[in-house]
């Protein structure tokens, strides 16, 4: 085990066991380095790794603190690795996504408010009205994010956002078959939103699962290349013509 790995796992153990709790300041470098048996350089590299995962937060002039360890933030850091998956690997993830999207849709149907319904149908109408693939992708992202919000589980919403971020890297709506695929996708959205509006968890779950399954079929059939220019835009849901 390298010195950096030793420092990383040592700090991770302190946090996992509760010795360092959420929001607590990490001990000074000299003290911590001596305890873990590593140099300051190795310790700093380990802190950078944990910061990338959302576990610690360096604060200029104040030191390094354990983050609030909110599950939605920790889950969100999965994007660092999930975004590396090639399309065949992403398609394996779709089996997980089908289950989670169905669960979230059912919860949204049970917990939806009139404002949720208005928002969903407003987004659908905007999706159907636009010819701009980038705008359609952003609206699609907001539609699914609204369903996840209505389910009232920020951790699940964060995990699904990670899954969808990678999916948006693969374009199908800009293919020759794109217009017909978009019409089918828009129709699926209406079925899903209607089930949520009707407070029908079973139908909402079925509609969400069918929608994700259809997306998976399209990706398998067309195997679109990853959009290289989407990296900067995908964080805001603007990968042109991409599925979410």
Image (cartoon, helix red, strand yellow):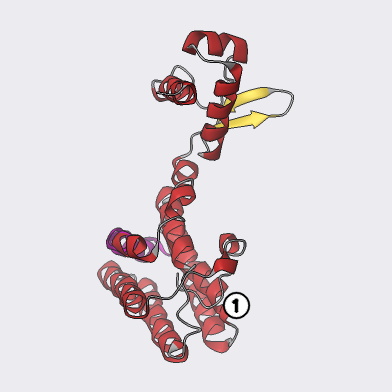
Residue located farthest toward the front when viewing the structure as drawn: 2
Query: Compared to 121, does 42 lie above or below?
Result: above
Left or right relative to 221: residue 114: right
User: Where, by quadrant of the figure, is residue 97 drawn?
Assistant: bottom left
Residue 195 locus on image (x, y percent): 34, 75
**Element class at badge 1:** helix
Residue located farthest toward the right when viewing the structure as drawn: 61
Estimate how packed mark 1 is, as few (under 14), some (14 to 19) or many (20 or more) residues with alpha carbons within 10 Å: some
Left or right relative to 236: residue 22: left
Is 64 magenta? The answer is: no
Q: Which residue is drawn at 34% across and 60% down?
A: 89
| Residue 212 visible in the shown view | yes
Q: Which residue is drawn at 29% across and 75% down?
A: 210
Query: Compared to 219, does 186 lie above or below?
Result: below
Q: The N terminus lies in which quarter of the figure?
A: top left
Q: Which residue is drawn at 57% across and 19% down?
A: 26
Q: Residue at x 53, y 82 (%)?
A: 127
Q: Give the range drawn in magenta.
A: 93-112
Residue 157 locus on image (x, y percent): 44, 55
Query: Compared to 164, does 190 lie above or below?
Result: below
User: Where, by quadrant of the figure, is residue 45 drawn?
Assistant: top right
Residue 129 locus on image (x, y percent): 56, 88
Query: Compared to 110, does 76 lie above or below?
Result: above
Q: The C terminus lies in which quarter of the figure?
A: bottom left
Is 111 magenta? The answer is: yes
Return the residue at label 1: 135
């Amino acid at each position: 085990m390298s010195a950096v790995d030793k420092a990383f796992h040592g700090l991770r153990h302190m946090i996992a066991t509760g010795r360092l709790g959420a929001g607590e300041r990490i001990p000074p470098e000299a003290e911590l380095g001596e305890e873990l048996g590593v140099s300051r350089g190795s310790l700093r590299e380990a802190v950078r790794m944990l910061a990338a995962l959302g576990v610690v937060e360096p604060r200029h002039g104040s030191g390094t603190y354990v983050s609030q360890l909110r599950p939605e933030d920790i889950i969100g850091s999965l994007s660092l690795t999930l975004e590396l998956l090639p399309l065949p690997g992403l398609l394996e993830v779709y089996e997980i996504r089908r289950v989670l999207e169905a669960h979230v849709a059912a919860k949204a149907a049970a917990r939806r408010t009139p404002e949720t319904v208005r928002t969903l149908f407003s987004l659908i109408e905007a999706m159907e009205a636009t010819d701009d693939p980038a705008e359609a992708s952003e609206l699609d992202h907001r539609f699914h994010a609204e369903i996840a919000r209505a389910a009232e589980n920020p951790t699940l919403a964060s995990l699904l956002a990670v899954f969808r971020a990678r999916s948006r890297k693969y374009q199908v709506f800009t293919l020759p078959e794109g217009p017909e695929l978009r019409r089918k996708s828009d129709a699926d959205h209406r079925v899903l939103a209607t089930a949520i509006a009707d407070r029908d968890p079973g139908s909402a779950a079925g509609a969400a699962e069918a929608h994700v399954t259809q997306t998976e079929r399209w990706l398998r059939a067309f195997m679109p290349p990853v959009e290289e220019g989407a990296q900067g835009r995908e964080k805001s849901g603007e990968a042109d013509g991409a599925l979410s």
